[in-house]
Each structure stands twice: as C-alpha cells, then as structure tokens.
Image: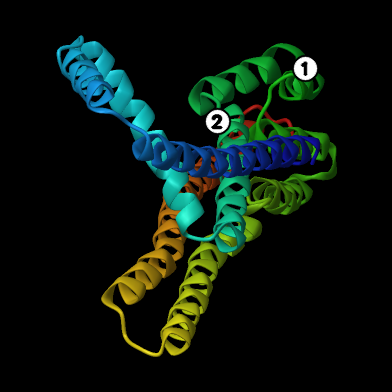
Amino acid sequence: MKRILSSLIITLSLSFVFIGKSFGQEESSNDAAALTNDGAAISSPDQTATEAGNEGSVNNSNPEEKDASEDVSFIQQLKQKYIEGDVLWMTPVLICLIIGMALSIERIIYLNLSTINTSKFLQDVEKALQQGGVDKAKELCRNTRGPIASIFYQGLDRAGEGLDMVEKSVVAYGGVQMGNMEKGLSWLQLFIALSPMLGFLGTVIGMIQAFDQIVKDGQVSPTTVADGIKVALLTTVFGLIAAIALQIFYNYITSKIDGLVNEMEDASISLIDILLKNKAVK
C-alpha cells in the first residue's frame, strides 16, 4: 500500500509539472508572437538581409545540432497539441495515464520480485526436510521471497495435523496470494476504460463549441469548422493513446500472474509428494 501511495504522489507531481510547463509554453508562445508582430512592423531592409544571413548560417550548421533541434521541436509540438486540445479535458486523460502507468510499474516490480527458480526451491525444500525435518524446511521458506515460499510455509506449518489439513491450507493460502498479485488491477481497468471516455467527452464538447461559434458568426467558415474539429479530436487521440498504452501493460501483468499461478499449483502438488516421500505428515 505504501508503494502504491508513493507512486501516486510521484506521478501526480510529474503531471502537475507537465501541466505547469504547458501553461508556460503557451504564455511564451503568445509573447513571442506579439514580439514578432511588433518587430515585423518596424523591420528595415538591412535587418531583413541580416536575418537572411542568419538563416543561411543555421542551414549550414552541424547535422547533430539539427537532430537535437528536431527532438526539442517534437517535445514542443507535444506540449502545443496538449494545449490546443483544451487543458480542461486533456489534464484528466493525462492523470489517468500517469496513475495507470504508476500502478502498472508497481505491479510489474512486485511480480518480478515474486518470481523464483521453482525447481531449485523444491530441491532445497526436499533437502532441508531430509537434513533437519519440517522445522528446517519452514526456516528455508521463511527466508525465501515470493508466494510459492509463503504457500509452502503454510503447508509445512500444518504438516503435523495430517495430509488433509496440509492440502486445505495450501489451497486457501493460494487464494490469498492470488489476491495479493491481482491487487490494483481493478483500478488499472478503470483507467483503461476512463481514458477514451474522457477523450470522447472532450471531443463532443469541443464540437458543441465549434457549432456555437458557427451560430455566433452567422455563417459556416471552413477555418472555424476545421479548427474546432481539430481541437476537439485531439482529446480523443490522447485518450486512445493512453488506453492503448495501459492495455499493453495490463495484458503483460495478467499473463505474468497466470504464469505464477500455474507455478504455484504445480509446486503445491510437488510439496504434497515431497511430504509423503519423506514421511513428514501423519
């Protein structure tokens, strides 16, 4: 729970920083446009020639500098599209994407840490049973991370109560471990569904605003219609991108969980066989 809260705080902070930079970019672009218009009004032929010379020197610059400028321009274009899509509707989509990514990364780290070499662990458990009995095998399971070791510990802890109790304990605690692995996936599904919905909502409202502008102007202007539709569709594009990215992470996480569940089931059967083989249950 602490990992999830810390991830959410970090991602929300990043989203606010991005939004703040976007607003700053918008103000800077407006100021630059105003300065450009003022400068164009008082420019002289000498200044025009100087600017032409400067453009020629830029065109002859190093190709690596051109690549760097292209990278910067892509980031600036991304911010500009974010602003054009209306920050009011783009911000919820961005928050859904960042929080969903934080949940996905947290689950991936948790599941990767839960993965162990099952074959080697089974050999170690059997060797511990042969050398020190159930207590040594429990100590090995206690010092091993992952859901398989936890299930083994619960089964070994009930070894003195008979085979039936061992099987019931393994099955019950296996369900608990599966719930731990699936923690947070319901929120991830929510953000996958919510991102395109918010994008469509922004698009519909943007279209309504475009038609309101047409009514206000009293005529159908191609510029007004095209600009309004473009701005409206940007929210849909960003919403679909967020949903696609989160869906990829979700499918990877579910496949990882399915693999761990299969390993848990196979290992549980192997535990019963090991206990019977070494006569560790009554």
- The spot of residue 138 in percent (x, y) is 77, 24
**At label 1, which amino acid type do we have?**
Lys
Quadrant containing the N terminus is top right
The amino acid type, in three-letter code, at marker 2 is Asn
| Label 1: element kind | helix
* In the image: residue 238, left or right of residue 192: left
Q: SS of the residue at dot 2? A: helix
Q: Quadrant of the C terminus?
A: top right
Q: Residue 95: give x, y in percent of width and height.
A: 62, 51
Q: How many marks?
A: 2
Does residue 269 appear in this view?
A: no
Mark 1 packing: few (<14 Cα in 10 Å), some, or many (20+)?
some
Residue under label 2 = 112
| Residue at 59 percent of width and 45 percent of height | 98
On screen, residue 258 above or below 39: below
Residue 109 visible? The answer is: yes
Pinpoint residue 52: horizontal percent, then vertical percent: 19, 23
Residue drawn at x 53%, y 75% is: 201
Which residue position is annotated with label 1? 136
Q: Nearer the viewer, residue 151 or 187?
A: 187
Specify the quadrant of the image occupied by residue 87: bottom right
Q: Nearer the viewer, mark 1 or mark 2?
A: 2
Percent across and percent down for residue 3 are 74, 35
Task: State the image quarter where residue 4 is shown.
Answer: top right
> Distance between the Cα atoms at labels 1 and 2?
26 Å
